[in-house]
Image (tube, grey):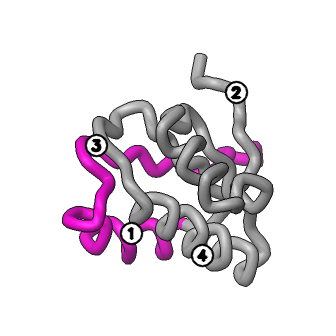
Amino acid sequence: MADAGPAVLRPEGALTMATAPRHLARGRSLARQSDMVLDFSAVTDADSAALALVFDWARTASAAGHSLALRGLPPGLASLAQLYGVEDLLPPICAEAA
């Protein structure tokens, strides 16, 4: 049987303090089940809460023996990670979807 590949989580709209709590459980569930790609291509706004989700889901995936990769990381979020000194802790960036 062929491997179906990683699950893709593609949040839409804002990924901020106000909206992050509604995404937390879904991301954890996917991270426990399989390797996961977090696709930011439909995210319109992101703040430090988005970074917190990334790190939470990366820990959850790792604890379950899975991996997390990022796709379409917004430049502002990458800058925020650099400002906080955590850019080296971010999961790897994967190629854009074809």
C-alpha separation, residue under disc 2 versus residue under disc 4: 22 Å
> Residue 98, position in %: x, y?
59, 16
Q: Which amino acid lies under the numbered mark 1 shown in the image of this protein? A: Arg
On the picture, is 32 further left or further right than 13? right
Whether pointer 3 and pointer 4 mark residues with C-beta atoms closer than 8 Å, the reply is no
Which residue is label 1 attached to? 26
> Residue 19, position in %: x, y?
23, 63
| Other-residue count near label 3 (Cα within 10 Å), few / some / many at <14 / 14–19 / ≥20 | few
Q: Residue at x 67, y 77 (%)?
A: 59
On the picture, is 48 further left or further right than 92? left
> Secondary structure beneath disc 2?
loop
Residue lying furthest bottom in this view? 63
Which residue is label 2 attached to? 95
Quarter of the image for residue 12 reads top left
Q: Which amino acid lies under the numbered mark 2 shown in the image of this protein? A: Ala
Upstream in the sequence, badge 2 or badge 3?
3
Which residue is label 3 attached to? 12
C-alpha separation, residue under disc 3 versus residue under disc 1: 13 Å
> Residue 35, position in %: x, y?
68, 59
C-alpha separation, residue under disc 2 versus residue under disc 3: 19 Å
Q: Which amino acid lies under the numbered mark 4 shown in the image of this protein? A: Arg
Upstream in the sequence, badge 3 or badge 4?
3
Which residue is label 4 attached to? 32
